[in-house]
Image: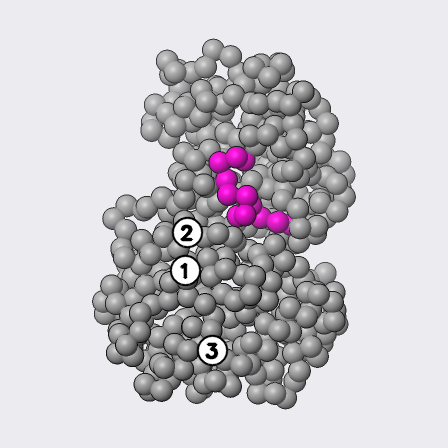
Amino acid sequence: MKKFLSLTLALACCASVFAGCGGASSSAPAASSAASSGSAPAEIRVVTSYGGDDGNRVNFENAVKAYEEATGNTVVDESATSNEQWKAQVKADFQTGSEPDVLFFFTGVDANEFIKNNKVVSIEEIRKEYPEYASNMKDGMLPASPADLKQYAVPVNGYWEGMFVNKTVLKDCGLEPPTAETTWEEFMAMCKTIKEKGYTPIACSLAEVPHYWFEFCILNQGDPSQHVEVPASATDAAGQRWAAGLNQIKEMYEAGCFPTNTLTATDADTFQLMADNKAAFAIDGSWKVGWFAGSDDAAGAVENLDDYTVTYVPGMGERKSTDIVAGLSMGYYITRSAWEDPARRDAAVAFVEAMTTDEVVNTFAGGTPTALKSGMTKPENPNSMQLAAIDMVNGATGSAPAVQDSLNATARKQLFASIKDIVTGSVKAEDAIQTALDTPLADEDK
């Protein structure tokens, strides 16, 4: 029989804890959710990266306490600081059969071993028994595993990549910022107009930071579900998409979209063109908002933040402009060992649901992107760029993580170093891809 875990009271308790009303609350449920689904209270082992020095450690402790009080279940918390040693220990536990019941872990290649060995349970399988599992999340933003393209982890928060826009330059060119409806062809026409007016259309160092345009030009060759695929060779379907994406960068270079010194300049030099009103567009991540806006400790790099915004990178083909590159790089997994024990299964499902409610996720996220259907919440006293970013993320129709994160470091370094040769025509895109894939792993990749 399909189960529906009723966590309404549990979620109310979680909310009360974050509001400082935890403990012996009068709203505490009389019966646990595990009991409501026919199971007695259980003990589960949980491993996360919310160790003692993590900024969300207190939030995690509060959420665990609320879950225990609401369900009657007990959590054995084995959380530690996320580092290479921690990742190695987690992997060793799976290899020796001592994995936890619930794991908060990375969603990329680091989890491939668990997935290939059937050690964790897919969201699709869980929903066959618990149809409401992760139902508050946008399915299109749940991370897909590079191992089999299935979704396993329920995420909390992450990052986005988007196109920063200099509105002053565009205004002088008689143009408006791109919107969700702007096509790639229209964007390239805008770049031509900007170049003819004497400005640099796109601030980018192909010598140092080519990877943002690499991501979006590859995304333009397919759709978000395909984006996590790393080619086995330059001739397979993924390899052909990569070649087409790299050739799109070549076309942009030949059209004069990049700075004249893009093959030798640093990222700092080219991005300064945005601040100096010499360039119109640049792609970067959510962390770049601080460069524009500044912080409590430093002034922003631009004179007037309202002269800039962030928006979607125009798309082509099957990819909508509103399909973005965004990462929800960690999430909650339920292990196969917990799933096969009915009592621990109920408790584990209830735990993940309690840790990923809208209230809890927003508390952890602090204004960064989430997969919540309710959308990104506004930080306190948001600036105009933060508001634009929220609109962009909330309006996203699909999301794909940065595929470069699924490529081993040796191949990634080799491929990105070849981009300047691809755009100048001295190396074919297919040859650069194959060379990168064939490059022996460095010691740190083994």
Magenta segment includes 264: no
Q: Please give the range of residues in magenta.
A: 134-145
Residue marked by disc 3: 205
**Residue tagged 1:** 180
Residue in front for this viewpoint, 48 or 203: 203
Query: Which residue sits at x=50%, y=43%?
Result: 138
Report the Cα–Cα distance between label 2 and label 1.
9 Å
- Whether residues under marks 2 and 1 lie with C-beta atoms below 8 angstroms apart, the answer is yes
Is residue 270 in sight in this rendering?
Answer: no
Query: Residue 125's quadrant in the figure?
Result: top right
Q: Is residue 318 visible?
A: yes
Q: Quadrant of residue 29?
A: top left
Q: Is residue 197 left or right of residue 96?
A: left
Q: Is residue 112 left or right of residue 180?
A: right
Q: Secondary structure at mark 3?
A: loop
- x, y percentage for residue 15? 39, 28
Which residue is pictured at 74% across the width and 71% down the height? Answer: 235
Figure check: 421 above or below 281: below
Q: Quadrant of the N terminus?
A: top right
Mark 3 is surrounded, within 10 Å at the Cα level, by few (under 14), some (14 to 19) or many (20 or more) other residues, namely many
Q: Outermost residue, left direction?
A: 304
Per the picture, the main secondary structure of the magenta-coloured stretch is: loop
Crowd tier of the residue under label 1, counting other residues whose Cα lies within 10 Å: few below 14, some 14–19, many 20 or above: some
The amino acid type of the residue labelled 1 equals Ala
Nearer-N-terminus badge (2/1): 1
How much space separates mark 1 and mark 3, taking CA atoms? Answer: 26 Å
- From the image, state whether disc 3 or disc 2 is nearer to you: 2
> Where in the figure is residue 97, as x and y percent of width and height?
75, 36
Q: Which residue is mark 2?
A: 395
Gap between marks 3 and 2, in whole Å?
A: 29 Å
Identify the residue at horizontal 64%, vertical 74% (top origin): 243
